[in-house]
Amino acid sequence: MSNLEIALGDQAPASACQPSQASRLSQYWTLTKPRVTLLTVFCAVIGSLLATDGFPGWGLLFWSAGGIWLLAGAAFAVNCLIEAKVDARMARTARRATARGELSAAQTIVFSSLIGGAGMAALYWMVNPLTMWLTLATFVGYAFIYTILLKPNTSQNIVIGGLAGAMPPALGWAAVAGEVPHQAWLLVMIIFLWTPPHFWALAMYRREDYARSGLPMLPVTHGMAYTGRMVWYYSIALAAGTALPWVVGMSGPLYLLAAALLNGVFLRHGWLVHRRYSDLVARKAFKWSVLYLALLFAALLADHYLMG
């Protein structure tokens, strides 16, 4: 229960104690972290489209994207439940229904089980077993290994746990091809390298939040100067990594040009975070990183169909 509900007790009006059906659905929807899930599904769809020279078909795209969305949403719901007490101490997450006690552990587990089970069934029966098992492994990696073991225990949580968040292109590729070749793992590597500068920029301007949470995020454990330097180093590594699809012949000059332009902006943000830090600089770097990934993968797709 929230503090307000405890304070009001039996005197609280029914509307305060019993959320409307619409607000309850909104609470469940928020548990799935829809904006993050959307980017996850987008990267998976790109993987699906890159896995074939033609078009994989709307049915396969629907079932694979839907199944991945459901399992990703289930993982995020479990994450919210496990981190409810931590979320309650952070301004950014304190309004989540699990943090406020408005959704119980049982309700969250049932919800996660239902949508996760539906996602597994969709992937197994309508796509292929490999995609289901890979997506389930990603669910376990994020919801349990990252959330329980890595995030509260090491400042390198984002780096080590980044593999789970980087898997969507491989899942989408497996849905179409029934295998995960080196081209798919290059896409995974790009997201893996993108994750630290993306998330550390957020952690830097939210450092007071993370200090209150008790989580060992890099700006709290190693300081702002060190974190800024790591953002810059990973930005360089990311720029180098994004050239590999062209190096191995997976993409052509259109993608290479787009990647060069996008990386130029990303590197500028990384340099500013490193050398001229301000919270505004970090906010801009974080926002750009989200758009950057979407544009980079869109460029891969455009090159695949226009230059292939």
Image (spheres, rainbow, N blue to C red):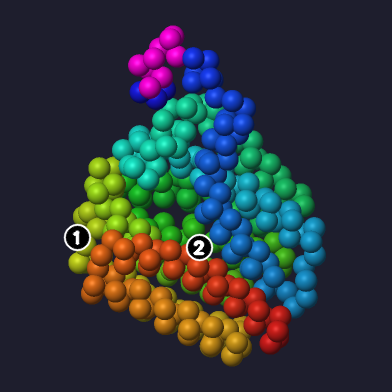
Q: Position of residue 149 (x, y in %)?
A: 37, 46
Q: Compared with residue 251, is residue 41 higher up or lower down, i.e. above or below?
A: above
Question: Is 5 contained in the magenta span?
Answer: yes
Image point 45% across, 14% down: which residue?
12
Relative vertical location of residue 55 with respect to residue 151 in this rendering, above or below: below
| Secondary structure mostly taken by the magenta-highlighted segment of the chain | helix
Residue 211 visible in image: yes
Image position of 235 (left or right of 37): left
Instruction: State whether residue 62 is above or below residue 214.
Output: below
- The region drawn magenta spans 4-12
Mark 1 secondary-structure assignment:
loop
Pick whichever, 20 or 171, lies toward us: 20
Quarter of the image where one finds residue 59: bottom right
Residue 140 spot, x, y in % from top left: 51, 47
10 Å neighbourhood of mark 2: few (<14), some, or many (≥20)? many
Near-viewer residue (73 or 120): 73
Residue type, label 2: Ala
- Which of the two labelled residues, at mark 1 and mark 2, occupies the earlier sequence position? 2
Q: Which residue is mark 2?
A: 166
Q: To which residue does mark 1 refer?
A: 223
Q: Nearer the viewer, residue 255 or 280?
A: 280
Residue at 24%, 72% in the rendered image: 276
The single residue placed furthest to the bottom in the displayed view is: 253
Q: Residue at x 50, y 67 (%)?
A: 291
